[in-house]
Amino acid sequence: MSLDIPSVQEIDGSGLRFAVIASRYNEALVDSLVDHACATLEAAGSEAPLVERVPGAAELPFAASTLAAHKRFDAILCIGVVIAGDTKHHEIIGDSTASALLDLSLTYQVPVINGILVVNNLAQAEARAGDSINRGKEFAQAALEMAQFTKKWKTIPNQ
């Protein structure tokens, strides 16, 4: 597992609104990611994010699209855990959701953070959703930074 993380920007999250959409598949792992993400957003000064649940990772893009269309959020975090099984289904879910979430960001001009862990086994998932390393915090930091970036550029007049 890579221990690399991006440098952390201190972002004032006050006034920023976030939504977290989380899969119920692998719920204990997802809950840990969601808890760390929400704590990070609130520690930055944002109000408590809206948290919505969907059945699995494949449903995250539709839910994100629905929320993005309302234009109420400065960023949307999609969180899930997909663990490989005996088939390539995890690869299909990982690839298709990544593409769909990126398309949503561009279509709605709102950051949609891909917080879907696609791993080969339970140990890898646990290593990324634990207390010492928790990617939920990183997903939230990306949401904060991209929300601030978007806010900055929406207020700069076109030249």
Image (spheres, rainbow, N blue to C red):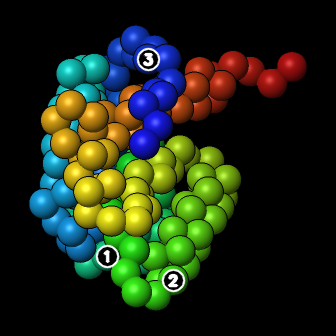
User: In the displayed image of the protein, which residue is found farthest to the top?
Assistant: 10
Query: Which is more N-terminal, label 3 or label 1?
Result: 3
Q: Where is residue 22 in the image (x, y as percent from the top left)?
A: 28, 61
Give yes or no for contact between labels 2 and 3 (Cβ–Cβ under 8 Å): no
Q: Name the quadrant containing residue 124.
A: bottom left
Disc 1 residue type?
Gly
What residue is disc 1 on? 56
Element at badge 2? loop
What residue is disc 2 on? 88
Label annotation for residue 8: 3
Residue under the image location 28 percent in, 20 percent down:
44
User: In the displayed image of the protein, which residue is found farthest to the right?
Assistant: 159
Disc 2 residue type?
Lys
Disc 3 residue type?
Val
The residue mark sitting in front, 1 or 2, is 2
Label annotation for residue 69: none
Question: Along the line of sight, which residue is nearer the eye, 78 or 108?
Answer: 78
Identify whether 138 is placed above or below 124. above
Name the quarter where the C terminus is drawn. Answer: top right
